[in-house]
Image (cartoon, rainbow, N blue to C red):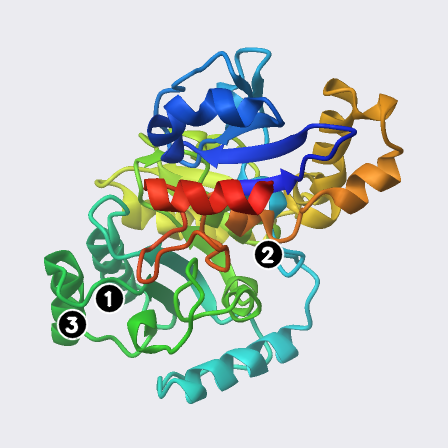
Amino acid sequence: MHILLKTTTNHKGILILTHKELPFLSRQLDKLSKTYYLFVHYGFNCGIMGHPLIKYNMISDSRCIQNDYIPFTSRNFLSKHFNNNSNIKETNQNIKLILQKNNINFSIDENIKNFKFIINTRATEFKKTFELLEYSLQYLERNVNDKICLIVLEQDVNNSYYKKIINHWNKNKHKNLCFIDTHFINSNNICYKGLTVEELCNFYKSSNVYLHACENEGESRTIHEALCCGCMILAKENMKGGGLDNLNNQNSILYNHKNIIEKMTHINNKYDSYTYNIDLFKKLNEEYSVDTFLNFIYKTLSYDSILSYEEFKDKSNTSELMFSLPAHKLDVPWYIKNKPTADILTIGQFEILLNYIK
């Protein structure tokens, strides 16, 4: 749940639910809708549940087939740090410090982009993390001078899939694979586990290509983080959902399990002629997209007859929308300790929300 705008005696507020919250809160929508406009953010490629009291469904571009579907998801509000403006020497010095701080022994050249490929993914079967590790090792066997960065976001260490990945890595370690298990990095950051946004951006900016393997994506924020940082994308040809929305022949290549190594070589050769898309960056970066989003709401919900745009913008909570829309921002009063997200899924949480939005 994200409170975009609090209600006042002069106007309704705006609440943005997650798709996970909607089934639980469906019986409470009538109460909420009396003083708030209700939106639903879809971060997963699932069916639009629909409800007459939901004003807008926030989904990926390719799924906007009705008037109440709008193409704004968490990937449209990426942090300003996801950009292509960097000094490569400074970027690599930052990477060295991150690796040293976390006792990861890996050689970094300060003067070039170090990684032919970067992978940033949770350790789950859904994300095909083990598959990505295998692709990386196979590629490095054939390309002995290249380097790959694989960031495995923290999972429960007792999870069998996580153990499978770690065991395979321990048996097949390669000097040119920078393997970062964020389980061992001390941080409260929910999205990148042990890495801050600023730290993660350095790894993207020192890489040519983002390698992705998930086959069903609601929006795929990581693909778009990488694009904003200057990476090309190598993604599964059978991927469903919004992950493919902004991919084209200029910025990506698609692959399957049989031709992956061939396609990895192909996209590396293609990278030398890649041109960064500044218009796509503006579509995805919060410094540009927040105003686009607020302007749309301001006019379509007739706030322009009540407030000036400056007043509306000042009252709207647009801080870290990339985290708050999917309930990944945990500093909210209804968050339950040790839960992976802040979705409102209990009566107790809902009662806290009601007290907070009065």
Give the Cα separation between the discs numbered 3 and 2: 30 Å
Q: Is mark 2 on a helix, strand or loop?
A: loop
Give 45 or 216, whichever is nearer the viewer.
45
Residue at image coords 70%, 40%: 289
Residue 93 point in image, percent of width and height:
57, 83
Question: Left or right: 206 with respect to 149?
Answer: right
> Which of the two residues, 159 or 88, is positioned nearer the viewer here?
159
Q: In which quarter of the image is the C terminus?
A: top right
Label 3 Cα neighbours within 10 Å, binned few <14 / some 14-19 / many ≥20:
few
Earlier-in-chain disc, 3 versus 2? 3
Q: Is residue 308 above or below residue 148?
A: above
Q: Is residue 58 left or right of residue 42?
A: right
Which residue is identified by label 1? 141
Percent from the top left, x then y, of residue 195? Answer: 45, 70
Mark 2 or mark 1: which comes first in sequence? 1
Image depth: mark 3 or mark 1 in front:
3
**In the image, what residue occupies the spot 39% across and 58% down?**
120
**Amino acid type, callout 1:** Glu
Instruction: Name the residue beneath numbered marker 3.
Output: 172
Name the kind of residue labelled 2 in the image. Cys
**The disc labelled 3 sits on which kind of residue?**
Asn
**Given this view, does label 3 or label 2 mark the residue nearer the observer?**
2
Crowd band around label 1 with a 10 angstrom C-alpha radius: few (<14), some (14–19), many (20+): few
> Considering the numbered disc 1 on the image, is that residue within a helix, a strand or a loop?
helix
Tell whether 16 sits left or right of 266.
right
Which label is found at residue 342?
A: none
351 and 22: which one is in front?
351
Q: In the rendered image, which quarter is residue 69 located in?
A: top right
The structure residue drawn at horizontal position 89% and vertical position 33%, both measured from the top left corner, is 308
Q: Name the residue under label 2.
A: 229
Question: At which x and y percent is residue 316?
Answer: 72, 42
- Can residue 251 be seen here? The reply is no
